Amino acid sequence: MTAADTTPIPPSPRHAPGATTAPQTLRDAPPPGPGGDWGPPPPGPQDQPRGPGAVLAGGAQPATLEAVALSAWFGKRKVLERCSLRMEAQKVTALIGPSGCGKSTFLRILNRMHEVVPSAQIAGRVELDGVDIYGGSLSTTAVRTKIGMVFQKPNPFPAMTIGQNVLAGLKLSGTKSGVDLPALVEECLTKAGLWNEVKDRLNEGGQTLSGGQQQRLCIARALAVRPQVLLMDEPCSALDPISTRVVEETIVELADDITIVIVTHNMQQAARVSTQCAFFLVEDQGKPGRIIEAGDTRVMFEAPTDPRTFDYVTGRFG
Ligand code: ADP
Ligand code: MG
């Protein structure tokens, strides 16, 4: 959106900013996958690649997500100020900063979840491989299929089995029939680092799993619709250290196939899993959060440009 960020986009009756504005300039569409722009791969079982990575490699191309001058409001209160960030394909980008500086809001704007709050508004653009996700060419369902989300608290569907949980998003995302569902379940659970622990209990309830296993089940569920980007909002904050380590290993492996953006308050975690970081901060109380500095994780931790980044990553505040 080209409007100055002092002019928030008014919410539509359904609070979809893009729906009330003229379509944005669209650049090149992402390269179509084997099943068309966003279908599952059509080949029969004999053509189905197997093993970890196969589903994702065959379903969606990694994509770069770019936020351009994103501002956000809740009602009249501005909570984000012109945040620009390029989240590279096949990399893990960590969003760091003290509580309340807008990290979750920024993340939720990246897959159009901010707009579910009635008073929420945004200005700026979010581009997935150059296509504005608010520009009118993509439905919110299409956006959320391409750009999945894993939340802080694991939220498997309680009435569903482990296997059913993995497949729960397929119908909503309009995934066509003809998919080898058992193979998809296996591959997504393998990718999420959970297969060996649950392969003999796929028909048990999702809530019979431990917290760390439930979070990996939620990751498997997010993967089943073949997202190009996975957003994770403090995915380990409710987990014990061993489960945290397993989820971190999963994140690093997933980054081979998809773009990952993770909010974390754990600086060791940011250092372990991410290749780039963005530091968010509210500079003065009551002011909106801004990205103070972003770049290579190693540089951000060892030689940041801004002294406030240094103070934060070394634990002097936050
Ligand atoms: P962070 O994730 O960095 O802790 P948030 O994005 O959750 O920060 O919050 C940014 C600011 O927006 C905070 O001041 C918070 O109180 C406010 N905020 C978050 N969600 C809502 C909401 N649903 N309604 C009104 N204000 C909100
Ligand atoms: Mg948050």
Image: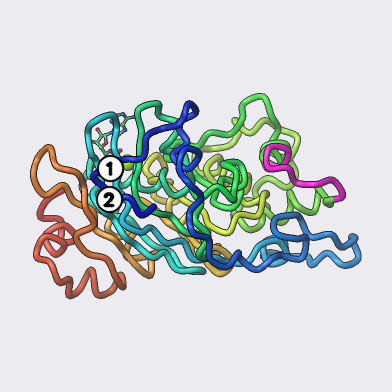
Residue hosting label 2: 4
The numbered mark at residue 7 is 1
Question: Is most of the magenta stretch helix, strand or loop?
Answer: loop
Q: Position of residue 191 (x, y in %)?
A: 63, 58
Figure check: 262 above or below 165: below
The quarter of the picture showing ligand 2: top left
Q: Residue at x 45, y 43 (%)?
A: 21
Q: Are marks 1 and 2 in contact (CB under 8 Å)?
A: yes
Residue at disc 1, CB closer than 8 Å to ligand 1: no
Query: Over which residues does the magenta segment extend?
Result: 170-178
**Label total for image:** 2
Left or right: where does residue 282 sit relative to residue 232? left
Q: Position of residue 82 (x, y in %)?
A: 26, 53
Type of the residue with mark 2: Ala
Indicate yes or no whether the magenta region holds residue 171.
yes
Label 1 neighbour load within 10 Å: few <14, some 14-19, many 20+: few
Q: Position of residue 152 (x, y in %)?
A: 42, 40
Which is more toward the observer, 6 or 145? 6
Left or right: where does residue 160 sit relative to residue 294? right
Label 2 neighbour load within 10 Å: few <14, some 14-19, many 20+: few
Type of the residue with mark 1: Thr
Q: Residue at x 79, y 60 (%)?
A: 41
Q: Residue at x 59, y 52 (%)?
A: 146
Q: Quadrant of residue 42?
A: bottom right
Residue at disc 2, CB closer than 8 Å to ligand 1: no
Left or right: where does residue 175 sit relative to residue 252? right
